Image: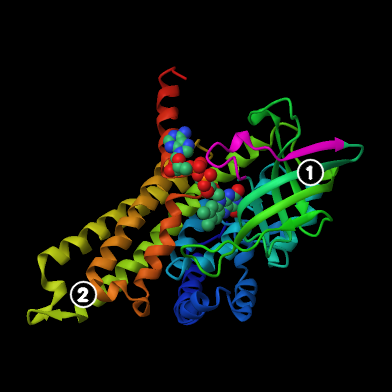
Amino acid sequence: MIRDQETLNGLLGTIARFVRERLIPNEDIVAETDEIPADIVADMKSMGLFGLTIPERFGGLELTMEEEALVVFELCRASPAFRSLIGTTVGIGSQGILFDGTPEQQQKYLPRLATGELAASFALTEPEAGSDAASLRTTAIREGDHYVVNGTKRFITNAPQAGIFTLMARTDPADKGAQGVSAFIVDADSPGIGFGKRDRKMGQKGAHTCDVIFDNVRVPAGNLIGKEGQGFKTAMKVLEKGRIHIAAVCVGVAERMLDMALGYAMERRQFGQPIAGFQLVQAMLADSKAEIYAARCMVLDAARRRDDGLPVSTEASCAKMFASEMCGRVADRAVQIFGGAGYMSEYGIERFYRDVRLFRIYEGTTQIQQTVIARNMVRAMGGR
Ligand SMILES: Cc1cc2nc3c(=O)[nH]c(=O)nc-3n(C[C@H](O)[C@H](O)[C@H](O)COP(=O)(O)OP(=O)(O)OC[C@H]3O[C@@H](n4cnc5c(N)ncnc54)[C@H](O)[C@@H]3O)c2cc1C
């Protein structure tokens, strides 16, 4: 937790300057090369960005959820691939260790994650288990003081760069549901781990995904996170926090797109005046502004509730659903305001349009968020 407002403002100002001076000027290079330049990664490490959520005693900044959201708002005013590199490690890749790991596991991994020396990925999805993640088939069968892991994980963000995986696998093959799933820390250089080809994606160049194949991979029993059969709960805790994080990402990117659209609308002249003077264009700008404001308020409210120790399953899903759908609408309006130029790569807005499509899909699709929200409402009324 940052102790005073001045220090927090200092951090946010430093990130805003980094985004302006280093990330935005490199967006085209990342899009062209599909790589984040090494000097930018080094800068991110030296700024402590890989330790945002990690406790101070392990070398991190130990931000509260609200502080994390404020940082993400700033950071995501640049191409989302930059955030992906950090966000997966400080978020879904490592939080399981923080929430449910043993003191030994935390001591072994968290300091190296905080410096960025190690990158972490989250391996839940499989070819046959996406939204229905509890039906996953990868097995981890105990043999003496090891578990032997077999199976394939799909679309795993940062897998090619990861030093460790938070892996969800079935330790009880007789139980086909959530109760049979356990969570593990798996070192990426363990013998038997193979990687598929990098996925060719619609957007978010510079953020890589691929299949991860486990072929008789021996994982020490000491790498089990929590207890056997509790891995799905760990994964859901990780994803609940991740949903607030992704909602914050959507707000940051949407603010950037709206800035671009407003700037263009002020410059572009038609019928003898800037198009920003036309009420129909103003309506698009105003709708985007209002929706971003709503999403920002939702993110901060959900974050504060979480910081206060309140349950946030519904709020996290509401924020993720609304913010990701909002981001899609803001992207669409931004392309519209740019007109034909919006369709051309050199203006950059079509890249954001493609990049943000992902937010409605990963870490729980919009339909899964709707399911969670409605299920919580029904349960609160005594239903199932
Ligand atoms: C770029 C990218 C990065 C990713 N990174 C990771 C990662 O790091 N780690 C990881 O584990 N996973 C990752 N994923 C996987 C992602 O979380 C899944 O793609 C997502 O959860 C959806 O699963 P699916 O693709 O199998 O779609 P499906 O589950 O097959 O869904 C297809 C459609 O059916 C709908 N649907 C499914 N079930 C229901 C239902 N019960 N009610 C209503 N509608 C339903 C969905 O909403 C969707 O519209 C990533 C995916 C992408 C594209």
The residue that mark 1 highlights is 149
Determine the residue positioned at 41% across, 23% down: 378
Residue 136 colored magenta? Answer: yes
Q: Is 17 rendered above or below residue 323?
A: below
Residue 143 colored magenta? Answer: no
**Residue 174's quadrant in the figure?**
top right
**Residue 283's quadrant in the figure?**
bottom left
Q: Residue furthest right?
A: 144
Looking at the rendered structure, the secondary structure element under dot 1 is strand
**Residue 162's quadrant in the figure?**
bottom right
The residue that mark 2 highlights is 265
Determine the residue positioned at 64% across, 72% down: 45
Tell me which colouring the rendered structure shows. Answer: rainbow
Q: Is 2 rendered above or below residue 65?
A: below
Q: Is 202 rendered above or below residue 231?
A: below
Front in this rendered view, residue 211 or 306: 211
Kind of residue at disc 1:
Val
